Image (tube, grey):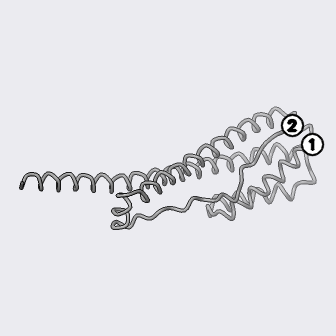
Amino acid sequence: MKYIVLGLLAILLIYIISTINSFVYLKKRIDRSKSLIDVYLKKRFDLIPNLVETVKGYTKYEKKTLEEITKLRENFNELKDEESGNKLNEHYKKILAVVEAYPEIKASENFLNLQKNLEKVESEISASRRIYISDITNYNTKVETFPNNILASIFKHRTIELPLYESEEIKINFD
């Protein structure tokens, strides 16, 4: 009888340890996938100076927009805040509108290469956001299901709110 009780306690202890470790593992996955989004956003913003220079050669009167984009990019690199990123996205859309107004820009080889790179980065951002949301969903499911929810409550693991991205992806279509 004594061995049965010890065996059950050992199984319970192993279950508790593995469940707590899985909470930690899932939280680390969330952190990693969130940082991946940041990497791709930075990659997108690093392409902006090239875009600005390409467009600058064709448009003289859009200088103010181009200068604002450069300043906002510098602010984003320093502050890394969502507001700077959203403002930069808005100005980024403006520069894409400028490109639409100048067909000769779309024919530029530099611009075509830049366009391909931007499309690839947008795709990577989208994929990394899907992974991030999936990781949060997996973690929340683990926290909310029985009997894990008991251990989650004891060890103060709470569900994580799914992000609502206000800065939507920028669709690039120059056809």
Residue at x 55%, y 46% (from the top left corner): 131
* Residue hosting label 2: 106
Residue 26 placed where, x, y %?
Answer: 43, 52
Q: Is residue 69 left or right of residue 11?
A: right
SS under mark 2: helix
* Residue hosting label 1: 102
Which label was assigned to residue 141? none
Badge 1: how crowded within 10 Å, few (<14), some, or many (20+)?
A: few
Residue at x 38%, y 61% (from the top left corner): 149
Residue at x 11%, y 52% (from the top left corner): 4
Residue 135 placed where, x, y %?
Answer: 50, 50
Q: What kind of residue is marked 2?
A: Lys
Q: Is residue 174 left or right of residue 3?
A: right
SS under mark 1: loop
Above-or-below relation of 99 to 17: above
Q: Nearer the viewer, residue 153 or 20?
A: 153
Residue 110 placed where, x, y %?
Answer: 79, 35
Q: What kind of residue is marked 1?
A: Tyr
> Pointer 1 and pointer 2: residues touching (CB < 8 Å)?
yes
Q: Quadrant of the N terminus?
A: bottom left
